Amino acid sequence: MSGHSKWSTIKRAKGANDAKRGKIFSWISRDITLAAKAGSGDPTANTRLRTLILKAKSENMPADNVDRAIKKGTGELPGVVYEDNTYEGYGPAGVAMVIKCTTDNKTRTAQDVRSILAKHGGNLAQSGAVAFQFCTWVRY
């Protein structure tokens, strides 16, 4: 029982819910920005963007947040620049891995990937050391 202060209980519950919603909103807005950057800002022409907008609506994300994310992706608004990076490495028992990341800070991401691989008995390889093993087509 919360004692005599019902507002304390409500405040904590609202704070926890707001934190969860904020995390979901930021994840969806980042994906919307990337989809708008990769294709066009028009949902009728960009199926990935249309799918993400429907996901945002299902999560009750405000329409102005969606519009802002699209404008950041098309370049109408300044914002964080996301880049796709590919890292190659070896996991436990020498398992080859190609790791694709989307980040706003290459240095931090490289350090995090290197740390995760090292903690689990692997290491980060040089570019091209692993990718040839994942070739999807072979020329005879």
Image (cartoon, rainbow, N blue to C red):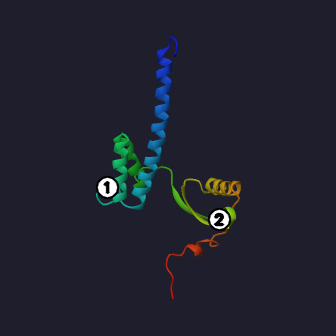
Distance between the alpha carbons at the discs numbered 1 and 2: 37 Å
Most foreground residue, 67 or 110: 110
Q: How far from the left and from the top, in percent, is residue 28?
A: 43, 47
Most foreground residue, 7 or 45: 7
Of the residues shown, which amino acid type is indicated by label 2? Gly
Q: Residue sitting at 59 percent across and 53 percent down?
A: 105
Q: Quadrant of residue 42?
A: bottom left
Using a 10 Å C-alpha cutoff, classify the residue at mark 2 as few (fewer than 14 neighbours), some (14 to 19) or many (20 or more).
Answer: many
Most foreground residue, 21 or 35: 21
Q: How far from the left and from the top, in percent, is residue 29?
A: 43, 47
**In the image as oriented, which residue stretches furthest toward the top?**
4
Using a 10 Å C-alpha cutoff, classify the residue at mark 1 as few (fewer than 14 neighbours), some (14 to 19) or many (20 or more).
Answer: some
Of the residues shown, which amino acid type is indicated by label 1? Pro
**In the image as oriented, which residue stretches furthest toward the bottom?**
140
Residue that carries the numbered disc 2 in the rendered image: 89
Residue 115 shows which numbered tag?
none
Left or right position of 1 against 94: left
**In the image as oriented, which residue stretches furthest toward the left?**
44
**In the image as oriented, which residue stretches furthest toward the front?**
93
Image: 127 above or below 23: below
Q: Residue sitting at 47 percent across and 47 percent down?
A: 27
Q: How far from the left and from the top, in percent, is residue 113?
A: 64, 56
Residue that carries the numbered disc 1 in the rendered image: 43
Left or right position of 110 against 103: right
Secondary structure type for disc 2: strand
Q: How far from the left and from the top, in percent, is residue 16?
A: 50, 31
